Amino acid sequence: MRIAIGTDHAGFPLKARLVTELEGLGHEVLDCGATDDRSSDYPDFARAVARAILEGRAERGVLLCGSGVGSSIAANKVPGIRAGLCHDSYSARQGVEHDGMNVVCMGGRVIGPELGAEIVRAFVGARAAMAERHARRSAKVEVIEADARSGVFGA
């Protein structure tokens, strides 16, 4: 699987460990930045990872920032992206299996490298297993997304 990864300065220290983990599992990693720990803005990397997924250059994405919250918020603004903040392996696996999550977000200031590696293992190892109830819920999320794109939530 090809995985896009992006991080701001706060998540940068965790990035190398996760790239090593992903490559060790046989995945190809598309590095969407940052390239160092100088101050940078998480929305730029959320956009880059989302674009890679939507353009078919990656199947899933990993986003890192200080808490993981900002990256999650930014990525979820992109139609077709289902980003989840995960600081445990259960949520990372379940997010894919039940909710169609295609981007996992983590806080580099919240978790350590070994937990981060455990989370990405669960994330990339999971497959969507949409039981009827999960498919129904997923379809409702798609309606919300379509409504937002069409301006139903505007004005």
Image (cartoon, grey):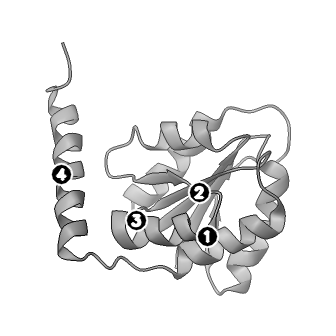
**Observer-nearest of 55 and 93:** 93
Mark 1–mark 2 CB contact (< 8 Å): yes
Q: Residue at x 65, y 57 (%)?
A: 87
Of the numbered discs 2 and 3, the one sitting upstream in the chain is 3
Q: Local crowd at mark 2 within 10 Å, few (<14), some, or many (≥20)?
A: many
Instruction: Give the secondary structure at mark 3.
Output: loop
Mark 4, residue position: 140
Amino acid found under the numbered disc labelled 4: Lys
Residue 32 visible to the viewer: no
Q: Which residue is mark 1?
A: 89
Q: Amino acid at mark 2?
A: Cys
Q: In screen coordinates, is 6 left or right of 108?
A: left
32 vs 72, nearest the viewer:
72
Q: Earlier in the sequence, mark 3 or mark 4?
A: 3
- Name the residue type under label 3: Gly
x and y, in percent, of residue 17 in the image:
81, 67
Q: In the image, 115: left or right of 99?
A: right
Q: Which residue is mark 3?
A: 56
Residue type highlighted by circle 1: Ser
